[in-house]
Amino acid sequence: MAWSMITPPSLTSAADAPSAPGPDRAGTAGGVQAVLRALDLMAVLTAMPDGIGLSDAARRAGLAASTAHRLLNTLANRGWARFDSGSGLWQVGPEAFVTGQAFDPARHLVQTARPVMQRLMERSGETVNLAIRADDRMLYLAQVECAEMMRAFARPGARVPMVSTGVGKALLAAGSLPTPAGADAIGTELDLIRRRGWALDDEEQSVGLRCVAAAIPAGRAGGTPKAAISISGPTARISDDRLDLLGRMVGDAAAEIGRAL
């Protein structure tokens, strides 16, 4: 999360523009085969959201265990897969979600949340953010900016620590596991969040910026919440006397999104 000011739109710089495709260095039969095998493994991981062991994944993808292990490690290095050392299982990684947003910006969650976020921005007068957990960090999916000159900005796709953000602490208080490093130090704060129903980032992520957040209930899918919504703005506007009101607003919005999922 960072500060942003209203500025005139500008042309995309050459450094920001997409580069032209280079030579097809993977256009050999072996390169294509490796890509197809990696995609087969991703399909297996997608079908097993709770995770799958190496030997089972290799069998389902029709691969030797050594080949599957090499490909999964490559996918994990790029964030497309992840290995849970506690359970010994492989799962889909956060980069798959980020790429999926380009095809379906909602994946139900963003599409469902956006009108609620818009109303919350209008009620609170502040920027509203939507985030999910990605390993031990929070991944921002969407933002509805307020009209104020000074406002918070969180680029969709940006990742921030769980223990120093309102959205992350809201999920931890709701029981999100595994527990990331540093969570034990905020145990008392997590108890407070559970009692009052909302979390606060009090200039922990960015100086001069406060975020009030609540976990979004898992909806009909059940289970532990995996997403959170927040109101963010400068401490001058998100003052102590507004925290309870904003906390109720963001909690109501989170509940509304959860009911619609």
Image: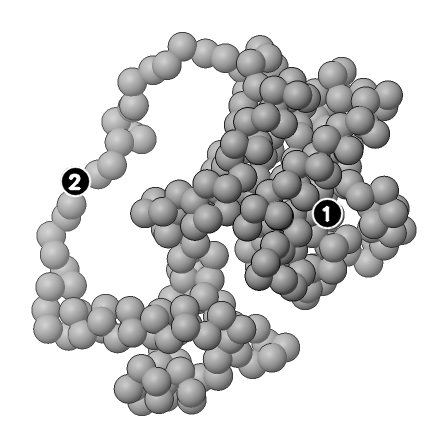
Residue 4 drawn above or below residue 27: above
The residue singled out by tag 1 in the image is 170
Q: Residues within 10 Å of mark 2 (few under 14, many from 20)?
A: few
Real-space CA distance between mark 2 and mark 1, rounded to the nearest whole angstrom: 42 Å
The correct choice, above or below, for 253 with respect to 137 in the image is above
Residue 109: percent from the left, percent from the top? 50, 47
Please, is residue 216 above or below residue 116 in the view? below
Residue marked by disc 2: 20
Residue 139 located left or right of residue 244: left
Count of marks placed on residues: 2
In this view, the residue in front, 33 or 40, is 40
Please identify, in this view, whether the residue under mark 2 or under mark 1 is nearer the observer: 1
Secondary structure beneath label 1: helix
- The reply to whether dot 2 and dot 1 touch (C-beta < 8 Å) is no
Give whichever of 71, 199 is nearer the camera.
199
* Residue type, mark 1 in image: Ala
Left-right relation of 154 to 78 = right
* Residue under the image location 43 percent in, 45 percent down: 106
| Residue 56 place in picture, x, y as percent | 42, 87
Instruction: Give the image location of residue 203, x and y in percent.
Output: 74, 31
Residue at (55%, 50%) from the top-left corner? 261
Task: Point out residue 217 in the picture as x, y percentages from the top left corner.
Answer: 66, 51
Crowding near the residue tagged with mark 1, few <14, some 14–19, many ≥20 C-alpha atoms within 10 Å: many
78 or 63: nearer the viewer: 63
The answer to whether any part of residue 107 appears in the image is: yes
Taking depth in this image into account, of 109 and 5 the one nearest to the observer is 109
Which quadrant of the figure contains the N terminus?
A: top right
Identify the mark nearer the N-term, 2 or 1: 2
What secondary structure is marked by label 2?
loop
- How did the renderer colour the structure? one colour
* Residue visible at 60% across and 43% down in the picture: 257
